[in-house]
Image: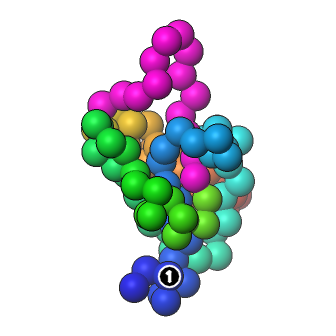
Amino acid sequence: TLKQNNTYLIALEITETSIELNKFQLSTNQPLALILGDEQFGVSESILNQMDTTVHINMYGNNSSMNVVQASSIALNTIINKFYTSKK
């Protein structure tokens, strides 16, 4: 499993304890897996309980969700930028 391979598991989901993606501190010493749910139900509670951290994309207005493709693009771009910035 990913956990057995020392992969850091990150869920992209709005929860009471999730961290804003922009404020997430990236640890570069282990592989990462980004877990996304579907557009209707999100990431299940049983999966969330297995995550090392949960992050969300800060949105303004009355929105609470976005298209999975848009969300994954934003999250991956942010995480990759954090990875390369931390390598400098």
Identity, as a three-letter code, of the amino acid under mark 1: Lys
Tell me the SS state at disc 1. loop
**How are the colours assigned in the image?**
rainbow
Pointer 1 local density, CA inside 10 Å: few below 14, some 14–19, many at least 20: few
Whole-percent x, y for residue 18 in the image: 63, 45
Q: Could you tell me which residue is drawn at 41 percent across and 28 percent down? A: 65
Question: Most prominent secondary structure in the magenta stretch?
Answer: loop
Confirm whether residue 84 shows in the render: no
Up-down relation of residue 23 to residue 63 (above or below): below
The quadrant of the image that shows the N terminus is: bottom left
Q: Is residue 36 left or right of residue 48?
A: left
Whole-percent x, y for residue 77 in the image: 46, 43
Image quarter for residue 35? bottom left
Segment tinted magenta in the rendering: 54-67
Up-down relation of residue 5 to residue 78 (above or below): below
The quadrant of the image that shows the C terminus is: bottom right
Q: Please, which residue is most extreme toward the front here?
A: 45
Image quarter for residue 23? top right
- The residue that disc 1 covers is 3
Q: Could you tell me which residue is drawn at 49 percent across and 44 percent down? A: 13
Q: Please, which residue is most extreme toward the top here?
A: 61
Up-down relation of residue 65 to residue 48 (above or below): above
Q: Is residue 30 left or right of residue 36?
A: right
